[in-house]
Amino acid sequence: MSRKKNDPAFPGSNTLLVLALLEDADKYGYQIIRELECRSDQTFSMKEGTLYPILHSLEAHGEVRSYERASDAGRRRRYYQLTRQGVKTLARCRREWESFCKQFGKVVGGEACVLG
Amino acid sequence: MSRKKNDPAFPGSNTLLVLALLEDADKYGYQIIRELECRSDQTFSMKEGTLYPILHSLEAHGEVRSYERASDAGRRRRYYQLTRQGVKTLARCRREWESFCKQFGKVVGGEACVLG
DNA sequence: TCCCAATACCTCGATCGTCGATGTATCCAT
DNA sequence: ATGGATACATCGACGATCGAGGTATTGGGA
């Protein structure tokens, strides 16, 4: 496969990951990265250079909105919240993922196929 | 997600797809594309500009070897065959895929996670 | 007190995978 | 004879991701 160490096994899924993490609560960037590591048993470790552009792009496309809020400690944090459209997109992406998974498994699993 | 129409839902998996398709028999490029479409119910449609570089790269890395053979009709065909190393790589990639799937599902599914 | 690690945000250039277009040639049916 | 399917290949462009770097604040240990 000639993949580098930190290369995620199957790239492209980061946007769906972010949307899914925003489902249960508004979150800020740093928190998304930490929670992703935790939820995936340290398998996924999204880089900041990956996450922030995704967040900004999602906001530009109306999938999320953001607001700034200071933490107890006074540190500034920008929270991201799913919009109604973002919720729909998340649902669609989940369906796409499931379908992809199924088809991919069918091929990689190894059932025969008769060609015309 | 802002993906283009023909963008595969989750890119990066093409190499694994190719290795898996070569498992049961030696195959040539065009055949791989057709069989992939068939096995995945037309979901995956690998482009030639994607496949051939992958094939060449796999050969350069010793995962497959190739030989030319004319078909009945006399058309030239370059068949690709998994090497012993290719078989090992396929097995490893399958394990990685399964692990990825599991972790990804855990996050996208939506179980809670308590952060430290 | 001073410094470093962690928190928190962000941007930039490089790289890699994939696509779409294009090119070549052969075979077959119309 | 013309066009579509087969069959191989390469090229430039683009988008996603990474790694490195930059800024600033907070809290803890030496």
Image (tube, coloured by chain):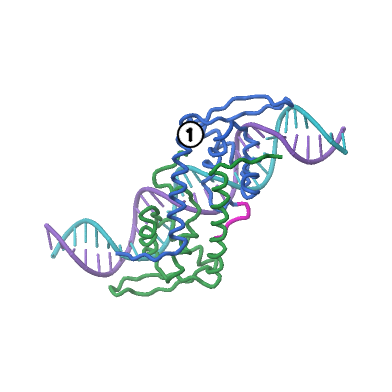
Chain colours: A green, B blue, C cyan, D purple
Q: Quadrant of the C terminus of chain A?
A: top right
Going 57% across and 27% down the picture, which residue do you hit?
B66
Residue A45's spot in the image, x, y percent? 38, 54
Query: D20 or D29: nearer the eye?
Result: D29
Q: Specify whether A26 is left or right of D8.
A: left
Residue A62's spot in the image, x, y percent? 54, 69
Residue B79's spot in the image, x, y percent? 61, 29
Which secondary structure class fits the magenta region best? loop
| Extent of the magenta region | B1-6
Q: Does the magenta stretch include residue A24?
A: no
Query: A66 or A25: nearer the eye?
Result: A25
Q: Specify whether D24 is left or right of B25.
A: left
Residue on which disc 1 sits: B87
Residue C9's spot in the image, x, y percent? 39, 65
Q: What residue type is labelled 1?
A: Val
Going 55% across and 30% down the picture, which residue do you hit?
B81
**Subunit that carries the residue with mark 1:** B
Q: Does the magenta stretch include residue B4?
A: yes
